[in-house]
Image (cartoon, rainbow, N blue to C red):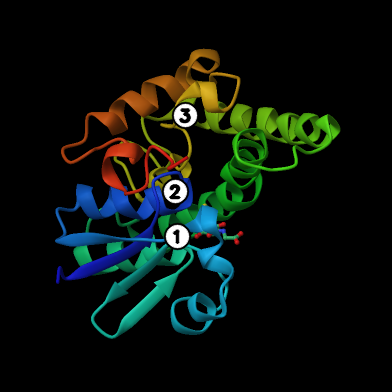
Amino acid sequence: MAEYQLYCFAQSGNAYRVALMLNLIGAPWQPIFVDFFKGETRTPKFRTEINEMGEVPVLVHGHKRLSQSGAILTYLAEHSGKFLPAGEDERLEALRWIIFDNHKLNGYLASFRFLRNFANPKPDPAVGEFLKGRIRSSVAILDQRLAKSAFVLGDRPTIADLSLVAYLFYPPEEFGFDIAADNSNIAAWLGRIRDLPGWAHPYDLMPGHPLAA
Ligand SMILES: N[C@@H](CCC(=O)N[C@@H](CS)C(=O)NCC(=O)O)C(=O)O
């Protein structure tokens, strides 16, 4: 059994944040596949034994069991000393971006991608249009931020970056638009993250891709 276990599945950008961080810090970890598309996160067993919130990612480290990628990234940064915001100002700045990301950027992007690729029945197109508008606005905010510095908090990557990349390495065809092609600062930033030793694509890092028919 590896030191860290991560409940995850390949299509989850929320879980990818944590899988990527574990890889980047060189932690010994193993994925535990969660069959989200068969409803595993909704089962009483998952909710009583794994996570009462009914979500992945869940990280197990010894006696600790953590959910919410923002909390997990914080835990890993504090334990490894890597991707750690320095001092109170940076800590709060990272938290501010992680909350913005969870709510307004990847929160909407994840919902949009789910509805477009996996929902059955398909939603009213107006829902997709609403989400697209919200995504466009949040992506522009991130792109502007990245015009000022190489990474979100400055010249080195932190957990704020690892949160914000959540769904941005998934194939553009899954979204029907290409965020990197349309936003040059985001494209350059994704390139810098891709160059970090230990980077891997979500579909190579977590189990469950391609989806079984
Ligand atoms: N804010 C959470 C979001 C987690 C989340 O929504 N996970 C999805 C998978 S990508 C999930 O497990 N959803 C289960 C469900 O909706 O039933 C985080 O960052 O960890």
Is 165 on the left or on the right of 42, as rendered?
left
In the picture shown, does residue 166 fall above or below 103? Answer: above
Disc 1 is placed on an element classified as: helix
In the picture shown, does residue 185 fall above or below 149? Answer: above
Is label 2 within 8 A of ligand 1 (CB to nearest ligand atom)? yes
Disc 2 is placed on an element classified as: helix
Which quadrant, please, contains the N terminus? bottom left
* Crowding at mark 2 (Cα within 10 Å: few <14, some 14-19, many 20+): many
Is label 1 within 8 A of ligand 1 (CB to nearest ligand atom)? yes
Residue wearing tag 2 = 163
x, y percent for residue 207 = 32, 49
- Single out the mark in the foreground, 2 or 3: 2
Dot 3 amino acid type: Leu
Dot 2 amino acid type: Ser
How far is mark 2 from mark 1, CA to CA? Answer: 8 Å
At horizontal 37% and vertical 28% (from top left) the residue drawn is: 190
